[in-house]
């Protein structure tokens, strides 16, 4: 059963210490990235949540005084797919945004005025590189998973290409491997609506006189693409909004007209017109193909993938997700495909929480040792001193250190308890205190087996080895809850 919301949450703002070098050749310094963090306080089992076109970092929980939760509250929280009891969940606002991250409405340090149209062009790749810098500066060296829908799915896929060794799982929902001509066309119409507004003023509009009409029209047009024919029939039909007879004029008459108008009016209160221009253009540029081939473009990925489509989505129809699956399969990658059955169109990925919780939860749940082990752990040679072992443990904040031979095969293990005993026994050499008969496990073994071995032998760590005996990782009781696995 799904549990309650996270309660009150806070948005944080981090200024990157390093510049973001953009795909265009330009560079941005003092970039601010807005983010929210939920769940575990350490940097283990981190899941990055990427938002869609006009989203933000507020993905779950409530801001103080709010009555409406974050935009993906249905799948983030205790007991949900992105289980905050198990994972550290981080959601960011993209570079170029207007909800706390540096974008066109931000102050240009060189002029003291908003960037406006002087803001450099950005891409999905640039957004991902900014996110990567943020995570590194937060001390995060690996992502357990990255997840996103629509433009968020583009970011998730871009992560797998740009930083293949950094991310272990990718969940791409209602998205694609490239933007189609139709996507580009819709973006072009939206931008034209904004730039045709007399208040746009070539991007140099004031806070009190913005191109609200143009932005509202852009949102109205885009919102149509988020729905489906079935959902529009169900929600609106041909109902009139205020009267029972046609007025034979051009005032708002139909219920669907009123709805779109309301959506446009609400949107201008929370979004910057120039940000809309830059972000939609970034979506236009998105293309993971290489030499026209998505298979070639995804050849270097290393993650496990879950690709999800929405049955009634005509903006990102299922065939685009299936193209990603075919490309991953052609490369021999581990990937699953699922389809949300929904009448809601593209918005299905935000509305069908029950299906998403099942699909995503099944994919994220650890099933093998490799899912939880520390990859490429520090190790030491048998000929090393006890002092060297102690310094390694302190430096990496670990309590177990595999001892390896020259070829990387496991020779033994030394623990912080062994180091402590060496002082009392006045031992000097590592070989005198290390355990040579080591219980080990392989990465494809089940977590249940790992838990039973730890319990049976009263140990708190297992070296993970390959068929040749080389050390690949470490699994500790800190990352494996025996009571949870054995239930």
Image: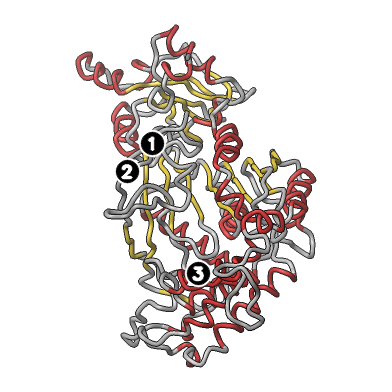
Whether tag 3 and tag 1 are in contact, CB under 8 A, the answer is no
Q: Which mark is residue 72?
A: none
Against 407, residue 17 (above or below) is: below
Reading the image, the residue beneath label 2 is 7
Q: Position of residue 438 (x, y in %)?
A: 47, 14
- According to the picture, the residue beneath numbered tag 3 turns out to be 262
Few, some or many C-alpha atoms within 10 Å of disc 3 (few <14, some 14-19, many ≥20)?
Answer: few
Residue at which label 1 appears: 4
C-alpha distance separating marks 3 and 2: 29 Å
**Residue occupying image coordinates x 39% and y 63%:** 33
Mark 1 in CB contact with mark 2 (< 8 angstroms): yes
In this picture, residue 447 sits left or right of residue 334: left
Label 2, secondary structure: give it.
loop
- Point out residue 205 in the picture as x, y percentages from the top left corner: 42, 88
Q: Nearer the viewer, residue 269 or 275?
A: 269
Q: In 3D space, how far apart are the residues under numbered discs 1 and 2 (Cα atoms)?
A: 8 Å
74 left or right, relative to 65: right
Secondary structure beneath label 1: loop
Of residues 114 and 144, the one drawn nearer to the viewer in this rendering: 114
Q: Are marks 3 and 2 in contact (CB under 8 Å)?
A: no
Residue at disc 3, secondary structure: helix
Question: Closer to the observer: label 3 or label 2?
Answer: 3
On the rendered structure, is 70 left or right of 335?
left
Number of numbered labels in the structure image: 3
Quadrant in the rendering for residue 278: bottom right
In the displayed structure, 421 sits above or below 58; it is above
Residue 138: image location, x then y, percent: 36, 52
Q: Measuring 35% from the left and 15% from the top, which residue is drawn there?
A: 432
User: Sequence order check: which comes first, mark 3 or mark 1?
Assistant: 1
């Amino acid at each position: 059963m799904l549990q309650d919301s996270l309660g009150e949450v806070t948005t944080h703002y981090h200024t990157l210490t390093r510049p973001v070098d953009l795909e265009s050749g330009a560079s941005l310094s003092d970039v601010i990235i807005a983010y929210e963090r939920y769940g575990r306080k350490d940097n283990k089992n981190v899941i990055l949540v990427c938002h869609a076109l006009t989203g933000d970092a507020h993905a779950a929980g409530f801001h103080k005084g709010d009555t409406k939760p974050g935009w993906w509250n249905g799948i983030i929280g205790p007991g949900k797919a992105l289980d905050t009891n198990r994972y550290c969940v981080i959601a960011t606002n993209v570079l170029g945004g207007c909800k706390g991250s540096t974008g066109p409405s931000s102050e240009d340090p060189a002029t003291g005025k908003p960037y406006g149209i002087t803001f450099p062009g950005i891409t999905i790749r640039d957004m991902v590189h900014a996110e990567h810098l943020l995570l590194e500066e937060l001390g995060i060296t690996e992502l357990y998973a990255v997840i996103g829908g629509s433009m968020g799915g583009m970011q998730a896929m871009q992560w797998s290409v740009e930083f293949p060794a950094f991310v272990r799982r990718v969940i791409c929902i209602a998205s694609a491997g490239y933007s189609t001509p139709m996507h580009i066309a819709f973006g072009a119409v939206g931008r034209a609506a904004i730039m045709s507004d007399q208040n746009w003023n070539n991007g140099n509009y004031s806070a009190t006189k913005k191109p609200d009409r143009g932005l509202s029209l852009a949102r109205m047009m885009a919102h149509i693409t988020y729905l489906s024919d079935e959902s529009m029939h169900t929600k609106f039909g041909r109902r009139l909004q205020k009267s029972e007879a046609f007025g034979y004029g051009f005032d708002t008459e139909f219920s669907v007209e009123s709805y779109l108008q309301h959506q446009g009016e609400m949107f201008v209160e929370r979004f910057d017109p120039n940000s809309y221009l830059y972000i939609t253009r970034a979506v236009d540029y998105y293309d993971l193909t290489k030499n026209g081939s998505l298979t070639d473009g995804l050849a270097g990925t290393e993650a496990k993938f879950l690709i999800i489509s929405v049955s009634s989505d005509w903006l990102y129809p299922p065939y685009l997700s299936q193209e990603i699956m075919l490309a991953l399969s052609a490369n021999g990658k581990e990937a699953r495909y699922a389809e949300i059955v929904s009448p809601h169109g593209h918005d299905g990925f935000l509305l069908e929480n029950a299906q998403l919780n099942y699909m995503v939860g099944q994919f994220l749940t650890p099933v093998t040792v490799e899912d939880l082990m520390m990859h490429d752990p520090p190790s030491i040679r048998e000929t090393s001193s006890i002092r060297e072992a102690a310094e390694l443990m302190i430096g990496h904040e670990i309590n177990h250190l595999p001892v390896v031979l020259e070829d990387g095969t496991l020779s033994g293990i030394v623990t912080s308890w062994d180091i402590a005993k060496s002082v009392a026994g006045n031992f000097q050499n590592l070989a005198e205190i290390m355990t040579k008969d080591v219980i080990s496990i392989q990465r494809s073994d089940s977590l249940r087996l790992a838990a039973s071995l730890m319990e049976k032998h009263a140990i708190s760590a297992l070296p993970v080895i390959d068929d040749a005996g080389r050390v690949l990782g470490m699994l500790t009781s800190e990352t494996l809850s025996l009571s949870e696995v054995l239930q």
